[in-house]
Amino acid sequence: MSAPASQSVSLPGGFAPNTTLVRGEGSPVVFLHGPFGQEWSDFLNDVAARHTVFAPAHPGAVEPNDLHQLDNLWDLMLYYDDVLAALGLDQVDLIGHSFGGMVAAELAASFPQRVGKLVLIDALGLWRDDAPVSDHVMVAPETQVELLYHDPNTPEVAARLRLPEDPDEKVDALVHSVSAVASTSHFIWPIPERGLAKRLRRVKAKTLIVWGKQDRLVPVVYADEFASRIADARVQLIDNAGHVPYVEQQTQVSQLVNDFLATG
């Protein structure tokens, strides 16, 4: 399948243009990526079979100077509000994974009228002392893989982890990942909790919470924590999946998400 189109989205405020990936036809869906960088997965191809999917880059991953203007989460919310406006999206369905799930939930709480439906996949943003979220930043690469995946040896995960053979492309891929982690950590490290729990009451969107049952990064108890704070939310646990269930159990997650987005 061909690669998604790349759209350079001009933004106010002196920010670098946001390079947003786009594919599909139909009602708009925005995907906000996790801490390891912008991506286009087979899961997004599945969603794009029914919708126009926009996958913006997180600020700072490409142009680090953008972070100088983003001191806190409210600055980040305004940034993404500007991205949605520049894309011409008054109201949109949001899918957020991990760090992107936290951002999606914050957007839905900050701008309730902007979000039609909300999908949170193994989202960061809450904290329980009895079930702490693991640190994905200051750990060895092999530990990072163990935190993210239930079974790193499956073909799907192996393909995701495989680096390009071309030396220059390999370096670019590694720099991309490190830059992405640095840019997202600007808002969540060392503890990924910034008061989201007290704001989730403002979410009006019908919400689907998808969680890998074997998530070692953000324990599965957080699925119910999110659901208990969002008025119209339901939880779907995915067995044999860790922090990235749309990779390890793509068919199941794609069906769940597409069915949810299609409901009235």
Image (cartoon, rainbow, N blue to C red):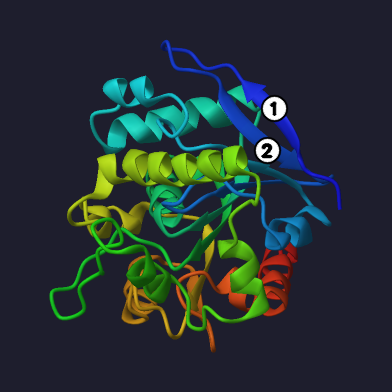
> Which residue occupies the foreground of this view, 25 or 159?
159
Decide if residue 224 is on the left or right side of residue 206: left
Q: Do the residues labelled 1 and 2 touch (CB within 8 Å)?
A: yes
Q: Which class describes the residues within 10 Å of circle 2: few (<14), some (14-19), or many (20+)?
A: many
Q: In which quarter of the image is residue 73?
A: top left
Q: Is residue 38 above or below residue 223?
A: above
Can I make out residue 154 in this image?
yes
Decide if residue 257 is on the left or right side of residue 15: right
Q: In this view, does 146 lie above or below 2?
A: below
Can I make out residue 227 in this image?
no
From this viewpoint, which residue is outermost toward the left? 129
Residue located at (60% from left, 63% from top): 160
The disc labelled 1 sits on which kind of residue?
A: Gln
Q: Quadrant of residue 230?
A: bottom left
Q: How far apart are marks 1 and 2 (CA)?
A: 6 Å
Query: Secondary structure beneath disc 2?
Result: strand
What residue is disc 2 on? Answer: 21
> Which residue occupies the foreground of this view, 97 or 155?
155
What residue is disc 1 on? Answer: 7
Image coords of residue 35 (percent x, y): 41, 51
Q: In this view, does 218 lie above or below 180?
A: below
The disc labelled 2 sits on which kind of residue?
A: Leu
Residue located at (37% from left, 26% from top): 64
Query: Secondary structure beneath disc 1?
Result: strand
> Which residue occupies the foreground of this view, 99 or 38?
38
Image coords of residue 186 (percent x, y): 27, 40
Image coords of residue 72 (percent x, y): 24, 34
